[in-house]
Amino acid sequence: MFNIKQAATRLGVSVSSVRRLIASSALPHVRVGKLVRITEPDLEAFVASCRVADVVESSPRVAPDATRAQRALAAYVARQQRRAN
């Protein structure tokens, strides 16, 4: 299980971005008292749900009902994929 900081590092986003994803219920999590933990399968499933099938060079495609955080993450993933190629 990852804490918020570890999940942020793993996703390559800020801690506040992970907190927003949790607050919007976009990222499943476990709360034990005041502690928040994200399981590895939940984190992987979230990333898979943000995956863009066809990356368009001008702009990434995401579902019209995607949250702003999901759009930002999809754009980040698209940039990383372009850099890898």
Image (spheres, grey):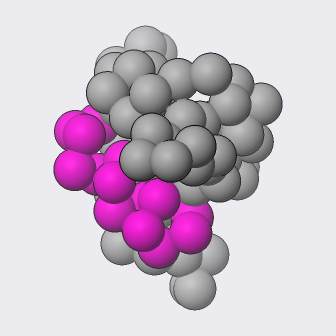
> Residue 67: x percent and y percent?
46, 75
> Residue 53: x percent and y percent?
70, 49
Residue at the outermost top position: 84
Residue at (34% x, 54% y) in the render = 19
Residue at the outermost front position: 33
Queried whether the magenta region covers residue 27, the answer comes back as no
> Residue 5: x percent and y percent?
32, 27
Queried whether the magenta region covers residue 25, the answer comes back as yes
> Residue 29: x percent and y percent?
61, 48
Is residue 23 among what the camera can see?
yes
Q: Which residues are magenta?
A: 13-26
Tell me which secondary structure the magenta stretch mostly adopts.
Answer: helix
Residue at (22% x, 39% y) in the render = 14
Q: Nearer the viewer, residue 50 or 84?
A: 50
Is residue 80 among what the camera can see?
no
Tell me the quarter of the image containing the N terminus.
Answer: top right
**In the rendered image, the vertical position of residue 45 relative to residue 60, given as above or below:** above
Q: How many marks?
A: 0
Q: Nearer the viewer, residue 37 or 51?
A: 37
